[in-house]
Image (tube, helix red, strand yellow):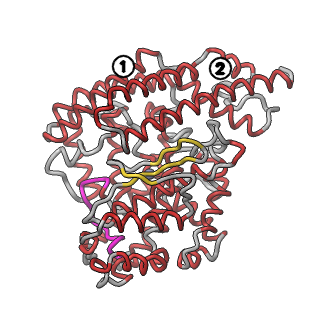
Amino acid sequence: MDTNSRSAAIAALRANDREIVLLSHSAALLSWDQETCMPRKAIDERSAQLSLLQGLIHERTVARRNGRLLEELGCSDENPRGDGGLPTDDRAFLRQYQRRYRRATRLPRDLVVKLAEKTSRSQAVWAEARAADDFRAFAPHLGELVELLLEVSDRIGYPQHPYDALLDEYEPFMLTSHVDRVFSELRADLVPLVEAIGRAPHVDNSMLRREFPVQQQAAFGTAVMQALGYELDRGRLDVSAHPFTTTLGADDVRITTRYSPRFFNSAVFGIIHEVGHALYELNIAEKYRGSLLAEGTSLGIHESQSRMWENMVGRSREFWHHFYPKLTARFPDSLGDVDLETFYRAINAVRPSLIRVEADEVSYGLHIILRFELEKALVSRSIKVADLPEVWRATSRELLGVEPQTDAEGVLQDIHWSMGAIGYFPTYALGNLYAAQFMRTIEADLPSLWSDVRDGEFGPLLGWLRGHIHSHGRTRTAAELCNDITGTDLSAAPFVAYLQTKYGDIYGVR
Ligand code: ZN
C-alpha cells in the first residue's frame, strides 16, 4: 500500500472513530442527566433515546468497511498496530481501534441482545432478592448470565483462561495469571496485617458521625477540588445516588458525589476520589483530543489515580496539616474539640467489615480477592452458582475473619454480577497496587512532594502525573505504563510496604 492510500485509510478510520466518540459523549450526557436531574417519569423516553444512540454506535463500530481498512493497513490479532512503517501515534490508534472492532464483531447480534435483556432483568431481580435476603430467587438468573458470559469469552477468544476475555473488557491486555500472582502476594501479607490490627487497641472514629451540615460539606469539598487542580470551567460537581465521573468531551469532565449529614467521610473523600478520575481524563495530550485515545488506558490505571489522590494524598497527615484548620473553621461544633492527630487516625481507622464499599484501605483488597476467586471458580466451572453463599461465607471467614449472617450482606451485596460485569472487581484492587508502585518513582523524582502537600501545593504532583500517565491517554497499555515508569511489572510489594509503614505507625503493629 502506498503512502497516500495508507493516509487515506487512516483518515477514514479516524473520521469513523470521531463519530463514534461524539455519539458516545452524547449518550454519556443523557446518562449524566438521568443520574443527576432528570424527572423520574422521563425514564421511558430516555431509555429509547439511549438505545437508539447505542444502536448507532454499534453500527458504526462494526461496519464492514472498517475491517477492510484495518486489513489494508496490516492489522491483525498478532499485529494489531498494523504496518511497521506507520507513524507511532497511528499505530497506537490502530491497536485500540482494532481491539474495539475485534471485540464488537466477534459477538453475534442475538448474543448481544440476549445479554442486554438478561442483565436488565437480572438487575431488577437482584434488587428484590437482596431486599428479601433470598439468594435462591437470584441464582437461576446468575446461572444464565454466567453461561452467556462464557459464550462471550469463547467467541472473543482468550490466551489462557476463559476469564482473560472478561477481564480484558475492563483491564485491557492483562491476563488472569498475572492477577493471580499479584493477588496471592497481596493476600499472604494482608491477612496477617488485618489480624494484627484487629488485636491492637481500636482507633476512635466516632467524631466522624457527628453533625456535618451539607452546605458546609459542599463548600469545603469545592475548595478542596479546586486546590487539587480540578477547574470548574472544564467540569462541575453534582449530586447523584452513586458517585461517578463522566467524560462528555475533552473540556467537559463532570463528577458527582453524595452527602450524608451525619457522616463526614462519604462526600469529601468521595469528591477527592472522583477528582482523581477527572484529572486523568482532563490532562490527556491535545493531539489525542476527540479520539478513542483520549481516555484512561484501563480501569486499573484509572483507579490508581482516584485512589492515589483519595488515600495516599487525601488521607495523609501532610494533606490535613494544610486543610484541617480550614475544616475545623467550617465545623467548629463537631470538630472543635478534635486535634489533628486524632482526626488523622480516625479517617484511617481499620475495621474489617462485611461490606466492600464501606471497607478501609487495608482490608479493601481482601474483599476484592474474595470476589475474584469466586468469579474465576464460576467461569472455570469449579463451583456451581448454588454453592456461592456457602463458599462466600467460608472465604470471608478465611480472609477477613468475619462471616455474614445473611446473604444480603454477603453474596448479594454488590450489583456487579447482576449487570454481567464479571471481571470488573480486580480493577479496584489493581488501582491500589499501581498507585503505590508509581508513588515510589514519584517520591524519588519529587523529593519535596510531601512538604509541598503540607503547604497545600498540589501542582508538582499533578504535573508529574500529567507528564508520565495522563498525557499518554490510551497510547500505552497499563503494563507498558507500569514498566516505563517503574522499570518492572506490577507487583503487590510496594502497596504492602506502604500499608505496613502507615498502619504500623497508626496501630503500633508490624
Ligand atoms: Zn473510582
Is 505 left or right of 477, judged from the image as shown?
left
Q: Position of residue 423 (x, y in %)?
A: 42, 38
Which amino acid type is shown beneath numbered disc 2? Answer: Asn
For disc 1, the marked residue is 114
Residue 351 vertical placement versus 87 (above, below): below
Mark 2 Cα within 10 Å, few/some/many (few <14, many 20+)?
many
Q: Residue at x 29, y 85 (%)?
A: 337
Q: Main secondary structure of the magenta part?
A: loop
Residue 247 image label? none
Residue that badge 2 annotates: 66
Q: Residue at x 62, y 42 (%)?
A: 294
Q: Is residue 471 above or below residue 31?
A: below
The part of the chain drawn in magenta is 345-357
Q: Looking at the picture, how far across and down is residue 115, in whole percent?
A: 37, 23
| Rendered image quadrant of residue 39 | top left
* Nearer to me, 11 or 416: 11
Q: Is residue 132 left or right of residue 435?
A: left
Mark 1 CB within 8 Å of ligand 1:
no
- Residue lying at 31% horizontally and 53% vertically, measured from the top left: 356
- Residue 400 is left or right of residue 246, and the answer is left
Q: Is 350 a magenta residue?
A: yes
Mark 1 Cα shell of 10 Å, populated few (<14), some (14-19), many (≥20): few
